[in-house]
Amino acid sequence: MALEFIAGCLGGCAGVAVGHPFDTVKVRLQTQDFQNPKYRGTWHCITDTIKHESLRGLYKGMSSPMAGVAFVNAIVFGVHGNMVKHIQNPDSLRSQMLCGAVAGFSQSIVTSPMELVKTRVQLQTEACVTTKSLSCAATSSSTVTNCSSYTSPVDCIRKIVTTEGWRGLFRGQLITIFRDVPGFSSYFLSYEYLSRSWASADGSVSPAVVLAAGGFAGALSWLVTYPIDMVKSRLQADGVGGVSKYRGIAHCLKSSVATEGAGVLFRGLNSSLIRAFPTNAATFAVVTWTIKTFQEQPEQDETHQSWRDILANGEALVQAAAIPTPLQLSFTPETSWRSAVSFLPQVMAASAATEEDQEEEHQETRCRCWQRQGTAVLGKLPNLFGSVCKGHEAFTCWRARQEDVFAAARLHHNLSIVL
């Protein structure tokens, strides 16, 4: 259970390190003034940010998602992995979609306040050329040039709580749920479909397939949920100082489309798709590598233990090798041929140890047999000795009688001669 959480932590950190600059570009393009745009596109936003704020400008607000992304991705992959283990028919795409939706709902509780802080820090620049409130961030480009109101994500949290209360930290919570539930259901659904479609003939998935499937799954997820994310970004950029421009989700969507047209729903999509591919490719690659690395050793231990149990029960090695369960599992697509034959040295060692044990048992059995026979023989010696003594006495008596007979016969012979 803990393995999926650990893998999610590591994969999320890798994804943030790769994709945060593109996330900064996405947020700035989403919230700039439509009538007087500051950026002409994704590339212009990148170059202008580096020119005026240096490379550090692209990584503004990264400490907030980096601090929370380990926990967030632990929830996503942990909830998804454990639901897959307990759900009926886990290999079906429908089950993958359902598990992804539950994982998205679970992590949205943490994601909403984290992205609120990230969004507001990303929208400020180093130069302080205006004193307008960030509550105008959704429609005014001068807001983007606002002075650095927040010195750090922690300072941003403190000021939000001071001006808007603890409730202000959860601004955009509902729209975050609306974004993450379909987003993560399509995320895991598309990854499973692509990885199975691109798998090799034996069913194994190469690292290149993991990278490609993860990247395209992330891009597809953003393509599905991007209009909802645009509304979320504007709602979270609104309301600084207690002054709110939008009354809710529907009002924000209606007002944005009425003012800037339907194209506003996909503003900054290019940067999001560019960011989504490497971010999610790195995330799935690290998650897959972590799970595979930590699962190999337990599988070998389980194989070794199974053979030890078979040998301990006294079954012949040839009979046990006919249909070994660990051997059948080791040839599944998820394991390599090295894992399939890794148990052979253990079996040979266990077989040699069993032969030595059997030889020692035979020697002990022979010794016990000799001891029993010797004890039986020694127990019969007194009777045998008594029998010998009785035989000797009988022989002595018989010999004495024979000597008397012989003497009488000789006397009779001598008398016959004299007469």
Image (cartoon, grey):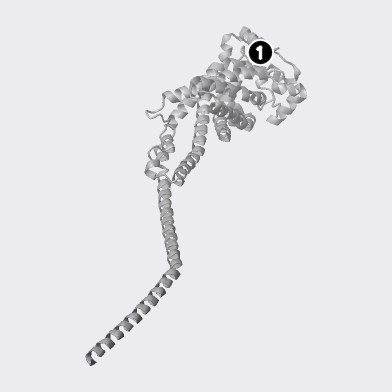
For the question of whether residue 350 can be seen, the reply is: yes
Location of residue 123 (image quadrant): top right
Q: Is residue 96 above or below residue 260?
A: below
- Residue 199, how many percent across, how many down? 41, 27
Hey, what amino acid is under mark 1? Ile
Which quarter shows the C terminus? Answer: bottom left
Q: In the image, what residue occupies the spot 42% across and 54% down?
A: 356
Categorize mark 1 by other alpha carbons within 10 Å: few (<14), some (14-19), many (20+). some
Q: Nearer the viewer, residue 105 or 140?
A: 105
Q: Is residue 122 above or below residue 248?
A: below
Answer with left or right where residue 151 lies relative to residue 291.
right
Answer with left or right where residue 77 lies relative to residue 373.
right
Q: In the image, what residue occupies the spot 39% across and 44% down?
A: 317
For the question of whether residue 41 can be seen, the reply is: no
Q: Nearer the viewer, residue 262 or 92?
A: 92
Disc 1 element = helix
- Residue 320, how many percent across, how many down? 40, 41
Location of residue 184 (image quadrant): top right
Q: Nearer the viewer, residue 145 or 87?
A: 87
The residue that mark 1 highlights is 249
- Residue 393, how many percent across, how many down? 39, 77
